[in-house]
């Protein structure tokens, strides 16, 4: 597009800025402000009314950033992902592929090959515990850390995996919770998935094996299916009338109003506190990562790209050229920075700062 021009387009249109940043219009009657030289593509599948406006100029509206992400490696090696080693910066080694959480002092807490590890803002990596088998991670206001996971029940024939939750307290004590709440003789990932805690202290699990959201009440030692029928699908609805299709290690995120967010196939799904499931954005690269910041912006990833989704469903895709590794988990801090765990050639924790424009 040339300077000072406008075009009306339908939902599903993509706009590419001169630096490669991409926004996908998922709503209606939106205005996107972009720059001269941007490329607008309307795919054949975008058959709705052309009531979104793409314009070049400085008017108010949804902006398309021309700045690149600021990305630094907080810790971990870009070329090694073998047995975990504590240390500082690039001297630390992660296995990679675990889930991330953020504590109240800005430390990244993560699961790493079943262990629980901590990364400080200065990049110092320490192992908190090797007890248990940690996957999803959540932290309460007192600093107690909770995790999803499983354990091989022995003796048994055939082998049986028992799902559980676990706690590593602020004082350093470890205990198992909800032992064998679910079991499987065929899937060693039973019990795995992203974990979050809401403002009332309830824990929610993105149950990877069964394509559902499960709620746990630690105080009463009870659990129940919160959303999802357990059958693979991508249908909105209330509670168990909805369906999800998760990848092997789905992240789960929660906002300040206790709304849950999860990736299901190529969509972002929102689960309200009453269990109502709606689709926020679709036609994204298939991936399992998701995070949400205090302003309600949702983050997810694709291949060398990070997407930021606003509350109206507009998707801005930022190129991430600092690594060719896969992003395996995301979390945000109180200042709006995004942290990404990676794994392939190496395994790192990346700190990502977004441009202000």
Image (cartoon, rainbow, N blue to C red):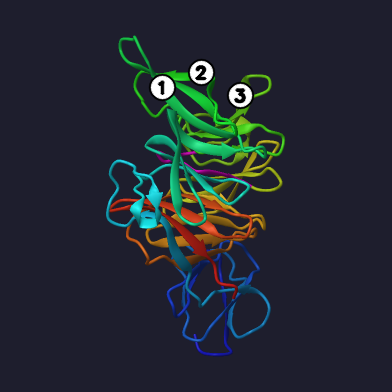
Which residue is disc 1 drawn over?
Answer: 151
Q: Which element is circle 3 on?
A: strand
- Asked if residue 284 can be seen in this view, the reply is no
Hey, which quadrant is residue 315 in on the image?
bottom right
Q: How many labels does the image show?
A: 3
From mark 1 to mark 2, how far is it between C-alphas?
A: 9 Å
Q: Specify which label sits upstream in the sequence, 3 or 1.
A: 1
Q: Which element is circle 2 on?
A: strand
In this image, 183 relative to 169: left or right? left
Which residue appears farthest toward the bottom when viewing the image? 3
Are there few (<14), some (14-19), or many (20+) residues within 10 Å of tag 3?
Answer: few
Which residue is disc 3 drawn over?
Answer: 224
From mark 2 to mark 3, how far is it between C-alphas?
A: 15 Å
Q: Position of residue 331 (x, y in %)?
A: 53, 51
From mark 3 to mark 1, how far is it between C-alphas?
A: 20 Å
Task: Point out the frontmost of discs 3 and 1.
Answer: 1
Q: Residue 272 carries which label?
A: none
Q: Position of residue 216 (x, y in %)?
A: 61, 27
Which residue is disc 2 drawn over?
Answer: 179
Hey, which quadrant is residue 34 in on the image?
bottom right
In this image, 350 relative to 54: left or right? left
Q: Where is residue 148 in the image (x, y as percent from the top left)?
A: 50, 31
Q: Where is residue 219 in the image (x, y as percent from the top left)?
A: 68, 22
Q: Which element is circle 1 on?
A: strand
Query: CB under 8 Å between callouts 1 and 2?
Result: yes
Q: Nearer the viewer, residue 247 or 4?
A: 247
Q: Specify which label sits upstream in the sequence, 2 or 3.
A: 2
The secondary structure that most of the magenta stretch takes on is loop
State the extent of the magenta-drawn residues as a range.
Answer: 244-254
In this image, 80 relative to 228: left or right? left
Are there few (<14), some (14-19), or many (20+) residues within 10 Å of tag 1?
Answer: some
Residue 173 vertical position relative to residue 352 in the rendered view, above or below: above
């Amino acid at each position: 597009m040339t300077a000072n021009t406008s075009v009306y387009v339908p939902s599903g249109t993509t706009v590419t800025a001169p630096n490669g940043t991409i926004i996908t219009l998922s709503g209606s009657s939106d205005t996107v402000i972009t720059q001269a030289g941007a490329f607008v593509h309307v795919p054949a599948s975008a058959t709705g009314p052309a009531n979104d406006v793409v314009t070049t100029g400085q008017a108010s509206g949804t902006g398309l950033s021309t700045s690149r992400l600021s990305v630094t490696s907080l810790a971990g090696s870009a070329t090694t992902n073998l047995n975990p080693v504590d240390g500082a910066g690039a001297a630390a080694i992660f296995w990679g592929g675990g889930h991330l959480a953020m504590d109240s002092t800005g430390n990244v807490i993560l699961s790493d090959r079943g262990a629980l590890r901590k990364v400080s803002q200065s990049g110092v990596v320490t192992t908190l515990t090797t007890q248990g088998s940690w996957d999803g991670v959540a932290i309460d206001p007192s600093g107690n850390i909770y995790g999803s996971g499983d354990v091989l029940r022995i003796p048994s024939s055939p082998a049986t995996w028992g799902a559980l939750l676990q706690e590593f307290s602020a004082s350093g004590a470890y205990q198992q919770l909800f032992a064998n709440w679910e079991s499987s003789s065929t899937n060693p990932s039973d019990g795995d998935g992203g974990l979050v805690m809401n403002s009332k202290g309830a824990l929610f699990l993105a149950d990877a094996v069964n394509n559902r959201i499960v709620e746990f009440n630690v105080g009463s030692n009870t659990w129940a299916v919160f959303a999802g029928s357990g059958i693979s699908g991508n249908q909105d609805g209330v509670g168990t009338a909805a369906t999800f299709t998760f990848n092997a290690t789905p992240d789960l995120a929660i906002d300040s109003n206790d709304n849950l967010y999860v990736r299901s196939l190529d969509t972002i799904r929102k689960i309200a506190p009453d269990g109502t499931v709606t689709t926020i954005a679709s036609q994204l690269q298939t991936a399992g990562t998701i995070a949400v910041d205090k302003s309600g912006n949702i983050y997810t990833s694709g291949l060398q790209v990070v997407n930021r989704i606003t509350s109206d469903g507009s998707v801005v895709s930022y190129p991430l050229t600092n690594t060719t590794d896969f992003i395996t988990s995301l979390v945000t801090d109180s200042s709006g920075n995004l942290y990404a765990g990676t794994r392939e050639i190496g395994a790192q924790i990346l700190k990502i700062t977004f441009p202000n424009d």
